[in-house]
Image (cartoon, helix red, strand yellow):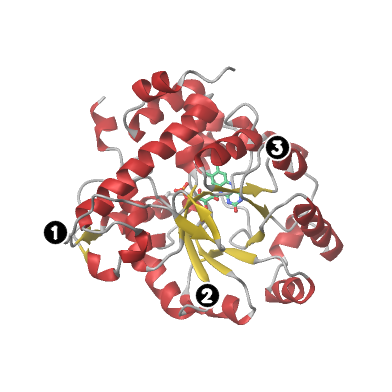
Amino acid sequence: MNAPPKAEMREQFLTLQEFVPAARAKLPPGPWSYLIGGAETETTVRRNRLALDSIGFRPRVLRDVSKMDSSAQLLSRKVRLPVLLAPIGGLESIVAGGAASAARGAAQFGVAQMLSSVCQPGLEATAAAADNLRIFQLYVRGDDAWVDDHVKRAIDHGYTAFCLTVDVAMYSRRERDLVGRFVKPWRATAPAGSSYQSGLSWNQVKRFKDKHSIPLIIKGIATAEDADIAVQHGVEVVYCSNHGGRQLDHGLGSAAVLPEVLKAVAGRAEVWVDGGFMRGTDIVKAIALGAKMVGLGRLPCIALAAAGVPGLVRALEILENEVQTCLGLLGVTSFAELTPQHLAPAPPVGEHDVFSAFPLLGEQ
Ligand SMILES: Cc1cc2nc3c(=O)[nH]c(=O)nc-3n(C[C@H](O)[C@H](O)[C@H](O)COP(=O)(O)O)c2cc1C
């Protein structure tokens, strides 16, 4: 598919919410449910939004915000916004080209992509698709030699950091997929390896850090206790996440857990976060709390499904505009000027679900 001209894309999508119906119209019911769904009652999905919506802003005024810089540092590299494309398994069922399309969009806009190990076209072909800032995320489904082989391949193909996702000791019950009888193509053909995932412990993290020097991210930390253990193991990034509410049901919202994780880490590692981030204001809240980077899961997938690579780039442009609007109205010109004093607990308003950040959708 040829990329539509930029002006046309800008006219078609003036807001992020417009990507949602466009994506829904493009995706078959199975992949759509897989994309938006969570575990069991989807309480964790809703709590991700509830936690973000329970934070309000304390704006400062008369501070000359005429020059704005919303760039950030990711592991000492400059990125255009403090966001990264979170790892998504099965992206190939959401957009033509799968992970390679996400890589191209990330490169064009100027943010990092974290590639999932259960995503096509695989780590070599995705690296060849774009000269982007990339990180590789592994589900451990093999022995130590199997893990080491992935580390070597990731380093050989220019991945800057390596991520182990650790909130998948059991594969959760995603009822939208079960009720819809959606069998993910990659699960039907994947080699057995779930016992390695259930058997994972901090011993493997220790072994990884003893053996490899590539920066290590542990994704799926949801308590201060585990954040502290991760830091004691020397990990470079503690990634606070509940997998977008897709694993443990009745978990806490990520933005609610973030303060205790930041306190436990106490500056000894970077803290990244994801879960329910759909808006520029959401990103500003996380950075003001102290996170260095925000992962976006469903949002970029929706943009990719709706309009391919140009759609992703357009969605990130709108997000950047929202971020800069928020920063300016808070009286700051960069993320570095944000502090927790720009935030206050606030009574949440309205409903909280996967698309509640886009309330106008309900009126269509
Ligand atoms: C369709 C889909 C597939 C995902 N696949 C993976 C994966 O392969 N590895 C992983 O660590 N996380 C995976 N996640 C979780 C995301 O990386 C991220 O933690 C989560 O989506 C963030 O929440 P959000 O979707 O509300 O932004 C997936 C999420 C979605 C929506």
Helix, strand or loop at label 2? It is helix
Q: Which residue is mark 2?
A: 227
Residue 293 in view of the camera: yes
Q: In the rendered view, tell whether residue 204 sits above or below residue 113.
A: below
At 50% from the left edge and 21% from the top edge, which residue is drawn?
26
Q: Which mark is residue 61?
A: 1
Q: In the rendered view, tell whether residue 258 sits above or below residue 46.
A: below
Residue at the limit of the structure toward the left, as seen here: 62
**Which quadrant of the figure has residue 247?**
bottom right
Label 1 crowd bin: few (<14), some (14–19), many (20+), radius 10 Å: few
Q: From the top left corner, tell me how far across and down residue 152 is, in percent.
A: 81, 58
Which quadrant is home to the N terminus? top right
Amino acid type of the residue tagged 2 in the rendering: Ala
Amino acid type of the residue tagged 1 in the rendering: Val
In the visual, does 296 lie left or right of 330? Answer: right
Residue 348 in view of the camera: no
The CA distance from mark 3 to mark 2 is: 31 Å
At 62% from the left edge and 58% from the top edge, which residue is drawn?
168
Label 2 crowd bin: few (<14), some (14–19), many (20+), radius 10 Å: many
**Which quadrant of the figure has residue 364?**
top left
Q: From the top left corner, tell me how far across and down residue 222 is, in percent.
A: 49, 67
Amino acid type of the residue tagged 3 in the rendering: Gln
Q: Which mark is residue 120?
A: 3
Residue at the limit of the structure toward the bottom, as seen here: 232
Which is closer to the viewer, label 3 or label 1? 1
Q: From the top left corner, tell me how far across and down residue 270 is, in percent.
A: 51, 69
Q: Earlier in the sequence, mark 2 or mark 1?
A: 1
Q: Using the image as rendered, state which of residue 231 and residue 360 is in the foreground.
A: 231
Q: In the rendered view, tell whether residue 315 sits above or below residue 239.
A: above
Q: Earlier in the sequence, mark 3 or mark 2?
A: 3
Q: Using the image as rendered, state which of residue 38 and residue 342 is in the foreground.
A: 342
The CA distance from mark 3 to mark 1 is: 48 Å
